[in-house]
Amino acid sequence: MTLYMIGLGLWDEKDISVKGLEAVRRCDKLFFEAYTSKLGVSVDKLEGFYGKRIIVADRSMVETQTNKILSPAKNSNVAFLVVGDVFSATTHVDLYLRAKKEGVDVIVINNASILNSIGVVGLELYKYGRTTSIPFHNKHVITPYDVVKQNKAQKLHTLLLLDIDAEHNSYMTIREAIEYLLGVEDKRKEGVFTRATRCVGVARLGSENPEIIYGTADELLQLDFGEPLHTLIIPSELHFIEEEALNQWRADKRKIRGES
Amino acid sequence: MTLYMIGLGLWDEKDISVKGLEAVRRCDKLFFEAYTSKLGVSVDKLEGFYGKRIIVADRSMVETQTNKILSPAKNSNVAFLVVGDVFSATTHVDLYLRAKKEGVDVIVINNASILNSIGVVGLELYKYGRTTSIPFHNKHVITPYDVVKQNKAQKLHTLLLLDIDAEHNSYMTIREAIEYLLGVEDKRKEGVFTRATRCVGVARLGSENPEIIYGTADELLQLDFGEPLHTLIIPSELHFIEEEALNQWRADKRKIRGES
């Protein structure tokens, strides 16, 4: 039978595609990968909408107990549900390859991910350089700083994804990301990311009320972006339409929502 | 009322999200932007599925006669349908900004685009550098060659989008893209793209039978990838999982489908 690898999009139960929903309805077992990202709604909400039970798959099931997913896919239709799009994480490529190796048919049903949905901010998607992520345990990590530096040298924007620890319900905030980058700047002193660096904080992208704020690192540090997920963009040189787009999100046009 | 900007995904009428479909059903007028990309199905198919008429919007309507779209959105719900995701083209950011300036509410409903769906090939999405595109009129164009060169220097993969001229039903093929790059190489002689360069040709991504083939430029030149859209990837250094993933698409494992 078939393993359907289905992207759920970014926010709620209705972001799945019509094709994805039809596939879910054909499946006997649904696995939900819930450790590399996070929807804005609970598993209950998905179950209610699908009219089916969901098995939440943690990292060990997906990476080391792959057979729990692949064995049933040999005799029945199985869905592997992923927040955003299907191949955002390398481990999903691995699952795909194993399935094919074991003779399981695989059908991929794509969806929006942060990599394209970020387009709403107004920076041209083709002017982003390499994407990077900031891990929680980052005391000795400098990669994100160097990626921003390299991208800037090529006049490219940088999208920074912020770490999540779903097991402990912990999600890196924009403030933590900025503090981390300022910390690296303190050591490196190359002027790649200072308190005056303009950046864009984005929270809950794909929801009905995403928060998008453009300002200096210093301004963004004073804001509470609220519920996860958070993302940070460091723009490089701007085309005039990009500049006009960013100005609609200017920090000084917005009320500061929190003090914490 | 509201302007719904809705991504349709990559292939057929069922790639729209459930949320997108619900929005379409609430709309009095549907505009379909059909000049920057192409679905695998006809407008008739979309109309049949939605149960509504669609107005096909060409470049001049979207870029210079914006009021044809924004005026009705002031008193009724209007959908602006885009192949792939909403903000793949700069002109859509412009439409978004104008709508907001004129006091029209805008709701964005995202979907898959080539930028994330390409993940199925097996190259890590975070290891792509800047994306570039090859235009039809490219006699004096060298940007794509330089982008590949810069990305390679940073050990990053390159996604090359190939031009389309929807008005004349003309879509650049993988062969034309390779011939173009070899032509620039002939002049520049920097060894960035030779007949021995390994690349991945991808056709009809998002459909049930996409064609994905990994081989040298020389091998890919001999293949007929069939119907549009075509895309070309030039991988840089490979992680071992990436290598394993690419090997499943090796040209020498596949039958050559055409001679033309």
Image (cartoon, coloured by chain):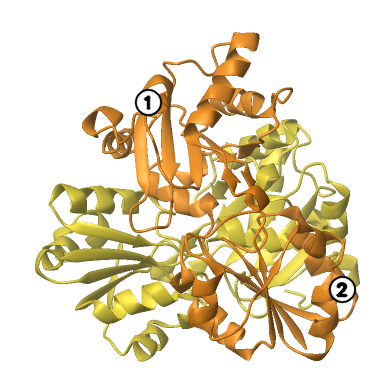
Chain colours: A orange, B yellow
- SS for dot 2: helix
- SS for dot 1: loop
Percent of width and height locating residue A69: 79, 75
- The residue under the point 20% across, 50% down is B100
- The residue under the point 52% across, 52% down is A114
Do the residues under discs 1 and 2 have CB atoms within 8 angstroms?
Answer: no
Kindly identify the amino acid type of the residue bearing the numbered disc 2.
Asn
In the rendered view, would you say B201 is above or below A51?
above
Q: On what subunit does the disc labeled 2 rest?
A: A
Residues beneath discs 1 and 2 located on the same chain: yes
Percent of width and height locating residue A232: 49, 36
Task: Return the residue at label 1.
Answer: A222
Picture disc at residue A188: none
Q: On what subunit does the disc labeled 1 rest?
A: A
Q: Earlier in the sequence, mark 1 or mark 2?
A: 2
Q: Is residue B174 left or right of residue B136?
A: right
- The residue under the point 59% across, 57% down is B116
Kindly identify the amino acid type of the residue bearing the numbered disc 1.
Gln
Q: Disc 1 or disc 2, which is closer to the eye?
A: 1
Quarter of the image with the N terminus of chain B in it: bottom left
- Residue B219 in sight in this render: no
In the rendered view, would you say A219 is above or below A245?
above
In the rendered view, would you say A186 is above or below A239?
above
Q: Nearer the viewer, residue B181 or B40?
A: B40
Quarter of the image with the C terminus of chain B in it: bottom right
Q: Nearer the viewer, residue B181 or B126?
A: B126
